[in-house]
Structure formats: structure tokens, C-alpha cells
Amino acid sequence: MDGMLKEVELAYDNAKEGRWDRVMAGWEQFPVLARRCSRYRKPSSGWTFLHQAAYFGDEAASRLLIRWGARIGHVAGIAADTGGNGGSGNSCASQTPADVAEERGHAALASLLRAANLDDRKLYAAPTDDDLLPSSCHWDEAAERRAAEPMLVSYGGGIVKIPKGSRHFVDAFDRTLIGWHGTFDPPLDMGGYPAVGIR
């Protein structure tokens, strides 16, 4: 097992125990770990970190995972009856994180996850490459940002490069808003008009 996978699995074990403060502190210190965790899927259950955050009703962890590129619509595989999250003998098969949140009584989080899901929109599907950030088309949530470092953003199966210091816009989860043909300053609609309100 490589060193990074070991770190991801250690973080997953902490997440499974509900120790989100510890997990998020590690992500803040090492963003590359956060990106890897956001894409991780437990081989034995199919559960992701986002499933675990949903299980515990942790909105802050859910928002960070979405920011880093978690697949919100990921459906977990069938889990063995081994006890614990993602293998508790409940109906763990075929559940999205939103389904898990709903089942655990976290209705507000379930609604938030369903509203944030872009996995069915091919251009904005969560990236599979750990080095790419996710994009979004939630224009009504637009907030202006400046890139603190160069950014590589997934869009339509390709990459949008945003240089350090460039203006761009993000949604409520800090996913970069990307418009037609990879436009970002501002993102443009199909008619060539700004898709976001610009001040």
C-alpha cells in the first residue's frame, strides 16, 4: 500500500468514527489529501467520505468534500453485514449520500446534497482525476474570487486553466463556475452573454 493511500484510509477510519474535526484539520493542512479523500471509495462497501459525512449529518464536511470534487450522486455498492457505517446490515445497497442523510434523519443535509448534485450534467460531472477541481453551473450562487494559485478545473471532459490572480466565480460550495467553451471570466452562456451578474 502506498503512503498516500494509507493516509486516506486512516482519514476514512476517523471519518467512520465521526471524528470530523480531526479529518478536516488534516485536509486544511494538506489540500492534496482532501482531494484524494473526496474521490476515495471504500472497496468493501462502496461508501465514500461523503457517505460518512451524510451518515453523521456533518454539513461542514459535506461542503468541503463537494468543494474538492466528491461525486454527490455516487451510489454505494452492496455492503456486507459487518457492523458499522457502510456495513451495518441496514439498506446500504444502492444509496447515494443524500439517501444516507435522509435515512439517518438529516433531512436538511439530504436536500442540500440533492440540490448540489451535478453528476447527471455531463459537462459538470465531478472529476475522476485527483489533480482537477470540480466545476459548476449554479449561476445564481455566483461569488467573485481571485485564484490564489494556478487552478486546473474539470469541464466537459477537458481542463480549464485558470492562472494565479485571475478573476473567476464560484458557487455556494466553492466550485468554479465554467461557462460555454470553458469561459470563466465571466462564464458565458451559449449566446455569448455573461451567465452571472457582474458588478
Image: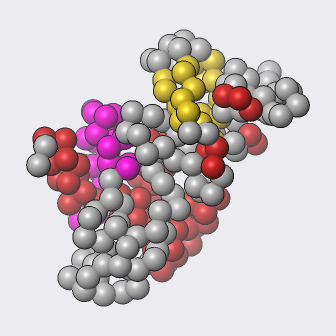
Q: Quadrant of residue 27?
A: top left
Give coordinates of residue 135: x percent, y percent.
Answer: 58, 38
Image point 64% across, 44% down: which residue? 123
Against 14, residue 68 (above or below) is above
Q: Is residue 30 visible?
A: yes
Give coordinates of residue 174: x percent, y percent.
Answer: 55, 38
Give coordinates of residue 44: x percent, y percent.
Answer: 25, 70
Q: Return the residue nearer the eye: 101 or 133.
A: 133
Q: Quadrant of residue 112?
A: bottom right
Q: Quadrant of residue 28?
A: top left
Image point 48% across, 54% down: which residue? 71
Image point 45% across, 77% down: which residue? 94
Give coordinates of residue 67: x percent, y percent.
Answer: 49, 42
Against 98, residue 25 (above or below) is above
Image point 27% across, 33% down: which residue? 29
Q: Is residue 196 magenta?
A: no
Would residue 118 appear left or right of 11 to someone viewing this image? Answer: right
Q: Is residue 23 magenta?
A: yes
Q: Return the residue nearer the eye: 14 or 187.
A: 187
Residues in magenta, as a range: 17-39
Would residue 66 appear left or right of 55 to someone viewing this image? Answer: right
